[in-house]
C-alpha cells in the first residue's frame, strides 16, 4: 500500500507540478544543480552517477552484510537442537 502511494505521488509530481513537469525536466534540473553545487567524490560532481566513493563503500558493506545474512541464517539455531532431538527420538521410538 505504501509503495502504491509513493508511485502515485511521484507520478503526480512529475506530470502536474509546474516546476518539474516531466522526468526529462527533473533530469535537466539535476544536471543544473550538479553544475552549481557539485558533489565531492562523485564522477564530475553529478547527482546522477554510479561512480562515487560512498557508493563503493555502500556496495562493499551490502555484499559483506548480505553474505553473512544468507550463510548464518542457514545454520541451525542452538535453541532448536533440543526440540529437533526430541522429535527425532520420538520418531525413532514409534518405528
Image (cartoon, rainbow, N blue to C red):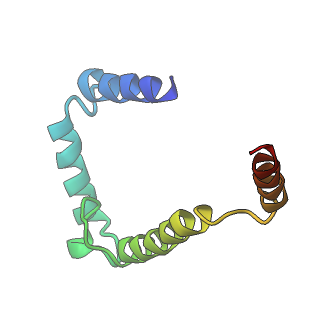
Query: Residue 81 appears in which quarter of the rendering?
Result: bottom right
- 45 vs 81, nearest the viewer: 81
> Where residue 9 sits in the image (x, y, percent)?
40, 25
- 8 vs 23, nearest the viewer: 8
With respect to residue 65, does 91 lie above or below?
above
Query: Residue 36 appears in which quarter of the rendering?
Result: bottom left
With respect to residue 93, does 64 lie above or below?
below
Asked if residue 61 lies left or right of residue 85, the reply is left
> Where residue 70 sits in the image (x, y, percent)?
51, 63
Q: Residue at point 48% right, 74% down? A: 61
Asked if residue 67 lies left or right of residue 91, the reply is left
Quarter of the figure with the C terminus:
top right
Q: Residue at point 19% right, 31% down? A: 22
With respect to residue 38, does 94 lie above or below?
above
- 41 vs 53, nearest the viewer: 53
With respect to residue 17, does 39 lie above or below?
below
Q: Residue at point 38% right, 22% down? A: 8
> Where residue 60 sits in the image (x, y, percent)?
42, 76
Total tally of numbered discs in the picture: 0
> Where residue 72 sits in the image (x, y, percent)?
60, 68
Farthest residue to the front: give it: 95
Q: Residue at point 48% right, 75% down? A: 64
Asked if residue 73 lies left or right of residue 49, the reply is right
Amino acid at each position: 500500500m505504501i509503495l502504491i502511494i509513493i508511485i502515485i505521488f511521484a507520478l503526480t509530481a512529475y506530470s502536474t507540478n509546474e516546476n518539474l513537469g516531466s522526468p526529462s525536466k527533473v533530469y535537466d534540473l539535476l544536471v543544473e544543480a550538479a553544475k552549481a553545487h557539485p558533489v565531492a567524490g562523485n564522477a564530475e560532481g553529478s547527482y546522477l552517477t554510479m561512480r562515487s566513493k560512498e557508493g563503493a563503500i555502500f556496495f562493499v558493506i551490502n555484499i559483506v552484510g548480505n553474505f553473512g545474512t544468507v550463510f548464518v541464517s542457514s545454520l541451525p539455531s542452538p535453541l532448536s537442537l533440543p526440540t529437533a532431538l526430541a522429535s527425532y527420538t520420538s520418531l525413532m521410538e514409534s518405528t
